[in-house]
Image: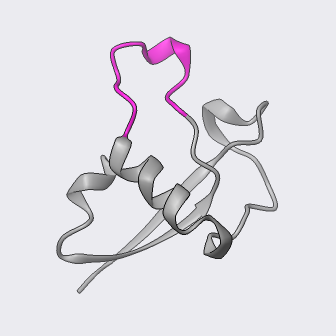
Amino acid sequence: MPYKFLTEGFDVKLYGQYARPVSDFKWLNKEQALENSFKKDSANIPKLPFHLGYHWGSKKDVIMYATKK
């Protein structure tokens, strides 16, 4: 789910490190709002102690934990 849809109506906690979508999904655009959130608050975003998904090799994984307000 795009991050921009979670910014209103949800409390969102970010984990990991942002990376652009992998080249297998060239039609996906970079999520500027998500990247900006990672840049703005990088000191307070915990790194993940494991790796998953398409970026497991680069060790840049993102988990967005959202709860409805």
For the C terminus, the image quarter is bottom left
Q: Is residue 66 magenta?
A: no
**Left or right: where 68 falls relative to 44:** left
Q: Position of residue 23 (x, y in %)?
A: 53, 14
Identify the image quadrant of residue 63: bottom right
Total labels drawn: 0
Q: Residue at x 30, y 47 (%)?
A: 2
Q: Residue at x 79, y 30 (%)?
A: 57
Tell me if residue 30 comes above or below residue 42 in the rendering.
above
Tell me if residue 23 comes above or below residue 17 in the rendering.
above
- Give the magenta part as a residue range: 20-31
Q: Residue at x 54, y 69 (%)?
A: 41
**Left or right: where 63 falls relative to 17:** left
Q: Residue at x 18, y 76 (%)?
A: 9
Tell me if residue 11 comes above or below residue 38 in the rendering.
below
Q: Is residue 25 magenta?
A: yes
Q: Position of residue 56 (x, y in %)?
A: 74, 36
**Left or right: where 19 falls relative to 43:** left
Tell me if residue 16 comes above or below residue 46 in the rendering.
above
Which residue of the protein is positioned furthest toward the bottom in this rendering? 69
Q: Specify the principal SS of the magenta part.
A: loop
Q: Position of residue 6 (x, y in %)?
A: 26, 63
Identify the image quadrant of residue 47: bottom right
Identify the image quadrant of residue 50: bottom right
Q: Position of residue 44 (x, y in %)?
A: 63, 76
